[in-house]
Image (cartoon, rainbow, N blue to C red):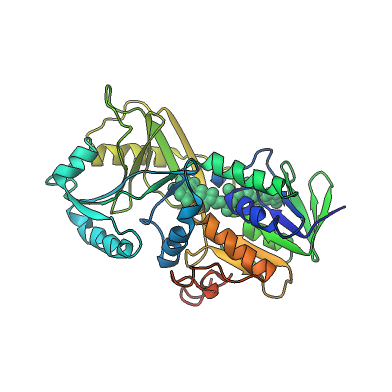
Amino acid sequence: MERADFLILGGGVAGLSAAARLALHGRTILLEGEEALGYHSSGRSVSFSHYGIGTAPVRALTAWSRPFFPPPLGRLFPTLYFADEAALARLDALREDMAALAEDVRIVDAAEMQALFPVLRTGPGGALRGLLDPTGLKLDADLILQSYAREVRGAGGNVLTGRRVTAIEPGWTVRTEAGEAFAAPVLVNAAGAWADQVATLAGVAPLGLTPMRRTIIVVDPPEGTRIEAWPFALSAARDFYIQPEAGRLLVSPVDEVVDDPCDARPEDYDVALAADRLEHYTTMRVTRIAHRWAGLRTFSEDRVPKAGFAAGAPGFFWLAGQGGFGFQTAPAMAAIAEALITGGPWPKGLAELGVAVEQVAPGAGRLAFGPA
Ligand SMILES: Cc1cc2nc3c(=O)[nH]c(=O)nc-3n(C[C@H](O)[C@H](O)[C@H](O)COP(=O)(O)OP(=O)(O)OC[C@H]3O[C@@H](n4cnc5c(N)ncnc54)[C@H](O)[C@@H]3O)c2cc1C
């Protein structure tokens, strides 16, 4: 049996970022069931940091986290939200939501949108107005995961892959499929889509997390087109986005299909939907889909990520519900986990941005949304 001060279950961005901080306070062991870190959601992310997603606490967690992504972990990448007639009110609401956090956001007209993103359909029936945020950040997901893992190891901790936990006893002792045992007084449940299942394994009441599938297709740009300077473009209607990456275009129909925790695969319907939306919003024609994938985005009931000890289960710590913003909020959520687990102060500046312990507490938001 190997003993530690902190056991982290899950080798995605949530578990790794928390482990990097906890390793500075005591012996830390992270256990990942797959052979590779980030095999599930964290390896399938579009890994962008922007304010066009999530509730007010999510935007605040995003703002707090930005300084933790200096180059090459993050690089400035303009973000363009565009609206057709039906979505203009949503664009205005988004502008208001973002105003306090991103000062340089400004309205752009059809001509400027065309200049920025030449394939966008503009004019009657197409995009009429846009919102340009020059402060979006493209994150390097792999580099971020590896640098957290390096920090854990550098502080004397262990990051162990191929360790699927199949039994958990209060106290906490966990056993892997292969029969190894690890024990620590604090167990951090950062198991992503499986976090409720892990809680059940530990005899802790689940939070009611919902994994939702999201699909990405990858297509070639129109022949002879230079796309490096294209923005990350999102419909204000929240049914489409497109992002240039490594000479190709990532496209999503922004699907949210409830799924079970699993190795998510793209469904034909969602792939076709992505192609259809691409042809609807742009002048591009889809003749070939170079690549496709799907991943799970796992939400708490109020869509605010959760960090905190489970009631009635001393030492069992939730770090779950990162939804579609697990990368952009990871530094803040890891700092919150560190503070709550080690008894340190609330992360400096977070309260001023409007994030209090009650909002991220496991179970928070249930009353607002009624019984689970
Ligand atoms: C298509 C797509 C686009 C996205 N775009 C963005 C974006 O632009 N910006 C952003 O911030 N976020 C984005 N996200 C969301 C982001 O990827 C997630 O919020 C984040 O990866 C969740 O991290 P996690 O560590 O909680 O989960 P995961 O990465 O899934 O990690 C959980 C880990 O726990 C392990 N595990 C589970 N059960 C056990 C067990 N019993 N024993 C051992 N290990 C176990 C799993 O194997 C898994 O590796 C996107 C997600 C998708 C799918």
- Residue at image point 47% right, 61% down: 64
Residue 184 in the image, given as x and y percentages of width and height: 79, 60
Farthest bottom residue in view: 367
- Residue at image point 29% right, 54% down: 237
The answer to whether residue 279 is seen in the rendering is yes
Farthest left residue in view: 124
Residue 93 in the image, given as x and y percentages of width and height: 27, 64
The answer to whether residue 191 is seen in the rendering is no
Instruction: Tell how many labels.
Output: 0
Who is closer to the viewer here, 28 or 90?
28
Farthest top residue in view: 224
- Residue at image point 64% right, 63% down: 338
Residue 106 in the image, given as x and y percentages of width and height: 23, 55
Who is closer to the viewer here, 137 or 223?
137
In-image side of 96 versus 169 (left or right) = left
In-image side of 19 versus 235 (left or right) = right
Height in image: 96 above or below 193?
below
Height in image: 227 above or below 311?
above
In-image side of 136 versus 180 (left or right) = left
Who is closer to the viewer here, 189 or 245?
245
Which of the 4 image quadrants contains residue 205? bottom right
In-image side of 136 versus 107 (left or right) = right
Placement of the C terminus among the 4 image quadrants: bottom right
Which of the 4 image quadrants contains residue 269? top left
